[in-house]
Amino acid sequence: MAYDDLRDWINALHKAGELKRITVEVDPNLEMAEIADRAAKMGKGTARAGGPALLFENVKGHPGTRVLMNQFGSERRMRLALETDSLDAIADRIRLLLKPETPTTLMDKLKMLPKLAEVGGFFPKVVAAKDAPCKQVILRGDEVDLNRVPILKTWPQDGGRFITLPCVITKDPHTGKRNVGMYRMQVYDGKTTGMHWQRQKVAAEHLRERLRAASADTAASVDLMALTAGGTTVAQSLESIPQATLGKIRDGRMEVAVAIGTDPATTFSAIVPAPPDVEEYLIAGFLRQKPLELVKAETVDLEVPANAEYILEGYVELGELRTEGPFGDHTGFYTMQDDYPVFHITCITHRKDPVYAATIVGKPPMEDAWMGKAVERIFLPLMQLTLPEIRDVNLPPEGVFHNLMIVSIKKSYAGHARKVMNGIWAMGQAMFTKCIVVVDEDCDVQDVAEVVLRVSNNIDPERDIQFTLGPVDSLDHASRLPNYGSKMGIDATRKWAAEGFTRPWPPMLTMDAAVKARVDTIWKKLGIE
């Protein structure tokens, strides 16, 4: 059965021996982050498995509160979080949905009915406010104060305290489709935070749509494209907008809600690269195999997870920006200051004795490495739906996910590797991938040593490396311009005559199968290990 809430998940972690309760007083200002960082990096080299989940029960300055960190910080815990023995098993479930077998008989059709009913049972359902644990305490007006929440500062040069594991809920103004994304939120004071909506994020597009609707003239609408993006054009964009139009825009608001401390599948669903028309609430139901319970928010027209520990309700004023950052990011470097929208909090609801959920990002491997690996395994079928020649994908944590992708393919024609590179660069969030390495299907992409062997031996650098220009991740500090730069693809597949390689391609070394089997039978007797 799915975890009902964060507390149910904490109990499961405890029973599995995956939870460490910290009773020593710890400061949320840097100390918790340092402890979580050390736990995430426990072990050495490839043996790094991630230390335990951490429940801080004696939080300095916040008596009676608790903070959960590193909840996803190992492969085993990711499997526990999603209640599966194998992340690839979830991928197989997705494949069945994407490519169901065509029924040929009446009996085959009848067998499909339970599967269709199962999918129908994943849709979220709205419950009454009285049944929603997240509304056990409701704070409005002067009672709203983020300073009462044990929000962390994670790195010394951070611009302040940041909410690092939020599920940010917005709604498309045209379709009404809800989106749940995970965007860091810098705390400015007790009632306002930054909202780190990078220009390519769905919530940023929701804000742009409202900006376009609020703008009276077309020219201003075009200029307003920059407002939710950050970057060097924000000030110029504001200056170019007529004052009457700017005043009208600033009278408009976009409602936002933020859930903190949800069940693990719901938290995870906020980071997945969902297809555009699929709500994250539905993905959470699919992962839980049980519908997510929602409740109407108190002050905004949005539905929020009923069992969350905290709900922050409020709005973003259209056209309002404020400096956000620096922030110690998952790249291992600080993301520097930039201008982003401001979130004004009108109401906080929470459970009695709430548990605050947080994470720290930085030099890998860290907790987000395992979350990213789960995304890689579970959503491989979606990549294969567009590029069926793909056999496997590896996003090494050291590549911080958007800097390096290793892909194995079933090569069928000359230039096939380059076709795959370009297909990936045209695919959703994969467009940010800085380096793509393509190898043959007999190469295990999860074995980085094998990949390095293939790449270093199989390429003629001038012939097999290609460069292109396009959008890059906003966190890429090395790109020539913010959000725009170059990318590299490496074709490390065997080269064919049709690709201009006329010499024989040598076979790789491999031992005779019969000899390997014989040695397997006597190996223990040899006393080598």
Image: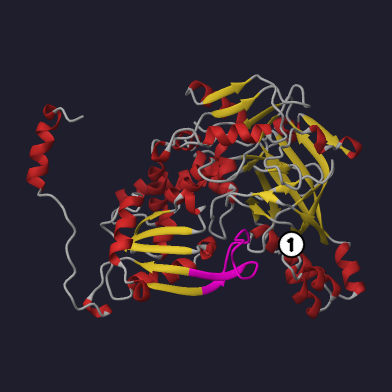
Residue that lies at the very extreme toward the top in this rendered image: 23
Q: Main secondary structure of the magenta part?
A: loop
Residue 403, horizontal then vertical, whole percent: 50, 59
Question: Callout 1, which amino acid?
Answer: Leu
Q: Is residue 224 visible?
A: yes
The stretch in magenta equals: 469-487
Q: Is residue 507 left or right of residue 120?
A: left
| Residue at the (70%, 45%) spot, across then down | 303
For the point 43% across and 63% down, the residue is 436
* Quadrant of res 527: top left
> In which quadrant of the rendered view does residue 202 lie?
bottom right
Number of marks in the image?
A: 1
Residue 100: percent from the left, percent from the top? 37, 54
Find out whether residue 442 is within the magenta segment. Answer: no
Left/right of residue 119 with respect to residue 30 in the rendered view = left
Q: Position of residue 491 (x, y in %)?
A: 35, 68
Q: Residue at x 72, y 46 (%)?
A: 158
Q: Is residue 440 visible?
A: no
Instruction: Tell me the quarter of the image containing the C terminus.
Output: top left
Residue 432 drawn above or below residue 62 = below
Q: Tag 1's secondary structure? A: helix
Q: Whole-percent x and y of residue 441?
A: 28, 59
> Which class describes the residues within 10 Å of circle 1: few (<14), some (14-19), or many (20+)?
many
Return the residue nearer the eye: 517 or 365.
365
User: Which quarter of the figure has residue 489?
Assistant: bottom left
Give the residue pinned by disc 1. 207
Q: Which residue shows up at 65% across the image and 57% down it?
A: 177
The reply to whether the magenta stretch includes residue 484 is yes
Give the side of residue 380 with respect to residue 415, left or right.
Answer: right
Q: Nearer the viewer, residue 501 or 433?
A: 501
